Image (spheres, rainbow, N blue to C red):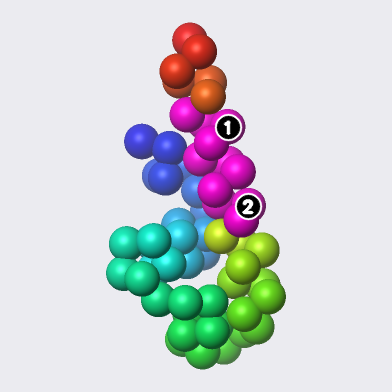
C-alpha cells in the first residue's frame, strides 16, 4: 500500500487530514508546528502516493 511508504510524520498528517477530517490548523496545534508546514507535508504525501500508484498501475 502506497501510504505505508511515507515517512511517519507525513503518514500521520495525511491520515489526520483525509481520514479524520482535521484541518491544517488543528493538526498544527497537535504537532506544535505551523499550518503551512502541515499543508506542505500533506501535499508532498499526496504527490508521493500518486507517483507510487502510477508506477503500480503502469506496471
Secondary structure mostly seen in the magenta stretch:
helix
Mark 2 surroundings: few (<14), some (14-19) or many (≥20) residues within 10 A: some
Q: Which structural element holds mark 1?
A: helix
Residue located beneath label 1 in the image: 51
* Residue 1 figure quarter: top left
Residue 8 at least partly seen: no
Residue 19 picture location, percent across and down: 32, 62
Q: In the current view of this chain or complex, which residue is farthest to the top?
A: 59
Tag 2 and tag 1, C-beta contact below 8 Å: no
Label 2 vs 1, first from the N-terminus: 2
Label drawn at residue 44: 2
Q: What stretch is highlighted in magenta?
A: 43-53
- Disc 2 versus disc 1: distance between alpha carbons? 11 Å
**Residue displayed at 56% across by 51% down:** 45
Side (left or right) of 43 relative to 5: right
As for residue 52 lying within the magenta part, the answer is: yes
* Residue 37 figure quarter: bottom right
Residue 46 at least partly seen: yes
As for residue 40 lying within the magenta part, the answer is: no
Mark 1 surroundings: few (<14), some (14-19) or many (≥20) residues within 10 A: few
**Residue displayed at 61% across by 62% down:** 41
**Residue displayed at 53% across by 77% down:** 24
6 or 18, which lies in front?
18
Q: Which structural element holds mark 2?
A: helix
Amino acid at each position: 500500500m502506497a501510504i505505508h511508504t511515507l515517512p511517519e510524520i507525513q503518514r500521520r498528517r495525511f491520515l489526520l487530514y483525509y481520514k479524520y477530517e482535521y484541518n491544517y490548523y488543528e493538526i498544527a496545534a497537535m504537532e506544535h508546528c505551523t499550518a503551512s508546514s502541515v499543508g506542505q507535508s500533506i501535499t508532498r504525501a499526496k504527490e508521493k502516493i500518486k507517483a507510487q500508484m502510477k508506477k503500480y498501475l503502469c506496471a
